[in-house]
Image (spheres, grey):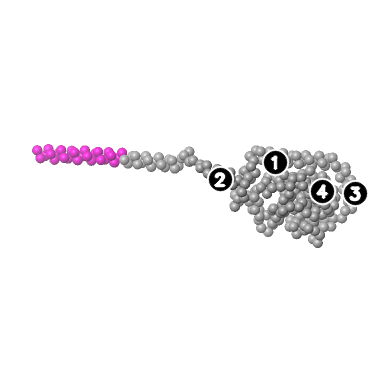
């Protein structure tokens, strides 16, 4: 009888241990599954939800000047200008095409008259010196000053770089005047300054006036101080945040100098 009781207790003990072991296994499996699910949620890129606050903040600060230079400047400039990439470049190409067409038509129309004028003024002596003062091509605030010894911040480009010119604030269609007696060396166009006129002032001094339209002068033409050499155009994509301006660069022996030191 005693042996049967002992055997019964032994069987119950084994049964209880089996039940407890089964419960422990089930609990362990559930814990592993929960941890695995949490890890998958952390690692899965499809479960990340982008907060709308960041998008709103980006829209609100699109027009503000950033504190640091960043890569990917092209897309940021387009956002600051409030234009899509496609519209932005289409507009830039259209402006460049119109400017070139205006320049070409003006040159063809006035070629004979200008050549005669250049011959008539060929006796004009170009003798600009450091002692002389130039006429301001346009009147306005300098929004980006000459800086070749250290870099300066360009808001549209969102980067620091040297500046060989003075960027002078102006308005569209404002006339631009020859700063001194000069000869037109070149009329051209590039992405940064748009349509420009390069002038020979004499004594190895040259000047460049950029961001122009409706240029009435031709190459090799002689200009007197104060003659109109063009009109202010819309800014190129390099200056959308800075706004409408005249790009004015002065050089001596092919090296940039600060034009403000020579202006009246």
Question: Circle 3 sits on which residue?
Answer: 120
Range covered by the magenta-colored residues: 1-26
Ranked by sequence position, the earlier of labels 4 and 2 is 2
Circles 1, 2 touching at the beta carbon (< 8 Å) = no
As measured in the structure, the alpha-carbon distance from the residue carrying label 4 to the one carrying label 2 is 46 Å
Question: Circle 2 sits on which residue?
Answer: 57
| Magenta stretch, overall SS | helix
Ranked by sequence position, the earlier of labels 1 and 3 is 1
Question: Circle 4 sits on which residue?
Answer: 228
Magenta segment includes 25 = yes
Front position in the image: 65 or 237: 65
Q: Can you say which quadrant of the picture contains the N terminus?
A: top left
As measured in the structure, the alpha-carbon distance from the residue carrying label 1 to the one carrying label 2 is 28 Å
Question: Circle 1 sits on which residue?
Answer: 92
Q: Secondary structure at mark 4?
A: strand
Structural crowding at the residue carrying mark 4, measured as other residues with C-alpha within 10 Å and reported as few (<14), some (14–19) or many (≥20): some
């Amino acid at each position: 009888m005693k042996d049967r009781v002992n055997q019964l207790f032994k069987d119950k003990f084994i049964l209880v241990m089996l039940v407890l072991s089964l419960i422990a296994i089930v609990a362990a499996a559930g814990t592993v599954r929960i941890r695995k699910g949490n890890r998958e949620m952390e690692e899965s890129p499809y479960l990340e939800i982008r907060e709308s606050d960041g998008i709103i903040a980006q829209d609100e600060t699109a027009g503000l000047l950033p504190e640091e230079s960043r890569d990917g400047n092209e897309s940021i400039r387009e956002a600051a200008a409030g234009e899509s990439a496609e519209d932005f470049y289409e507009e830039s190409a259209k402006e460049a095409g119109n400017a070139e067409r205006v320049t070409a038509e003006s040159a063809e129309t006035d070629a004979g008259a200008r050549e005669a004028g250049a011959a008539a003024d060929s006796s004009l002596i170009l003798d600009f010196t450091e002692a002389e003062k130039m006429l301001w091509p346009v009147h306005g605030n300098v929004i980006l000053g000459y800086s070749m010894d250290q870099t300066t911040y360009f808001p549209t480009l969102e980067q620091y770089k040297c500046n060989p010119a003075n960027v002078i604030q102006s308005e569209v269609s404002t006339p631009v005047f020859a700063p001194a007696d000069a000869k037109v060396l070149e009329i051209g166009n590039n992405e940064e300054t748009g349509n420009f006129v390069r002038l020979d002032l004499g004594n190895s001094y040259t000047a460049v006036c950029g961001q122009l339209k409706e240029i009435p002068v031709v190459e090799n033409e002689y200009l007197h101080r104060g003659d109109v050499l063009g009109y202010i155009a819309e800014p190129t994509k390099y200056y959308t945040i800075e706004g409408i301006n005249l790009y004015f660069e002065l050089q001596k022996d092919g090296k940039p100098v600060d034009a403000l030191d020579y202006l009246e």
